[in-house]
Image: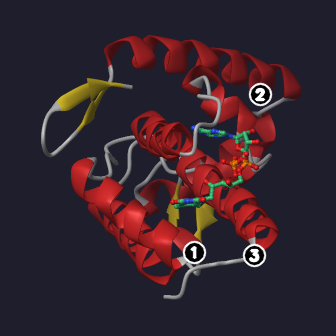
Amino acid sequence: MPKMANETLKQELGNAAWKLLHTVLSRYPEEPTTLQKNYLTQFISSFAQVYPCGDCARHFRKLLNKYPPQLSSRITAAVWGCHIHNQVNERLHKEIYDCSHILEDYDCGCGTDELESDFTLGGASLKGSKESEGNEIVKKENQVDDKEQSNKKNSDSDEVSEHLKSIKIESSENKVGG
Ligand SMILES: Cc1cc2nc3c(=O)[nH]c(=O)nc-3n(C[C@H](O)[C@H](O)[C@H](O)COP(=O)(O)OP(=O)(O)OC[C@H]3O[C@@H](n4cnc5c(N)ncnc54)[C@H](O)[C@@H]3O)c2cc1C
């Protein structure tokens, strides 16, 4: 992949690409199946191969080797992505982002969609993960009101803060704090 000489286009592409990556990670299931983990692993690996800025892609692949994707849960994946982006920020002398807001900042607004079976995820529901639970979960959809949504958002945020205290972003060389 060639270098991107036009800095403006490189920045615009970076903005859009990070937005996509963080939004995907923030919508990843809380309890992913092996299939879902495989899809995301392939996505990240392909992303690093096809990213149009050649220098960025090369650097990103090095980061992936050093900090392999951590995909055991939504929070883990989102915080991992945040950490990787912060590594790039550090290299480019940009501000370090506070990862405790990551799920709120990249909430796709998919809300109740998460209760339905989703064929982009092999027919599973993000909540239930198991296809057989799909019908029950869809029935529950109408019971989810705005209050529950807002409570969930708060508890997501608390959960992220708790998780940040405990998470260690695994490096293939050593372990560092998230
Ligand atoms: C995989 C990848 C590798 C890249 N490698 C390079 C490179 O090697 N050299 C180069 O010049 N450019 C690289 N870029 C582009 C670079 O990271 C920026 O996108 C670009 O410089 C524009 O920066 P920005 O300040 O507008 O914000 P960006 O870094 O594009 O971030 C966009 C927005 O995301 C939010 N944000 C910031 N940090 C985080 C975080 N840690 N987690 C979640 N959200 C955050 C902020 O709101 C920010 O405004 C890369 C981009 C990608 C996607």
Q: Residue at x 57, y 76 (%)?
A: 53
Amino acid type, callout 2? Gln
Where the C terminus falls, by quadrant?
A: top left
Q: Tell me residue 58's x, y (percent).
A: 39, 70
Establish if 85 lies above or below 65: above
What residue is shown with label 1?
Answer: 119
Closest to the observer, 140 or 100: 100
Q: Is residue 93 left or right of residue 170?
A: right
Q: Is residue 112 left or right of residue 168?
A: right
User: Image quarter for residue 165?
Assistant: top left
Label 2: state its secondary structure.
helix
Of the image marks 1 and 2, the number of the one nearer the N terminus: 1
Establish if 14 lies above or below 93: below
Q: Tell me residue 173's x, y (percent).
A: 12, 41
Q: Nearer the viewer, mark 3 or mark 1?
A: 3
Closest to the observer, 37 or 69: 69
Q: Tell me residue 3's x, y (percent).
A: 56, 80
Tag 1–tag 2 contact (CB < 8 Å): no
Q: Residue at x 56, y 26 (%)?
A: 99
Label 1: state its secondary structure.
helix
Closest to the observer, 148 or 100: 100
Q: Residue at x 34, y 66 (%)?
A: 61
- The span from disc 3 to disc 1 (Cα, nearest Å) is 38 Å
Tag 3–tag 1 contact (CB < 8 Å): no
Q: In the rendering, which numbered label is found on residue 149?
A: 2
Q: In the rendering, which numbered label is found on residue 6?
A: 3
The crowding category of the residue bearing disc 3, from other C-alpha atoms within 10 Å (few below 14, some 14 to 19, many at least 20), is: few
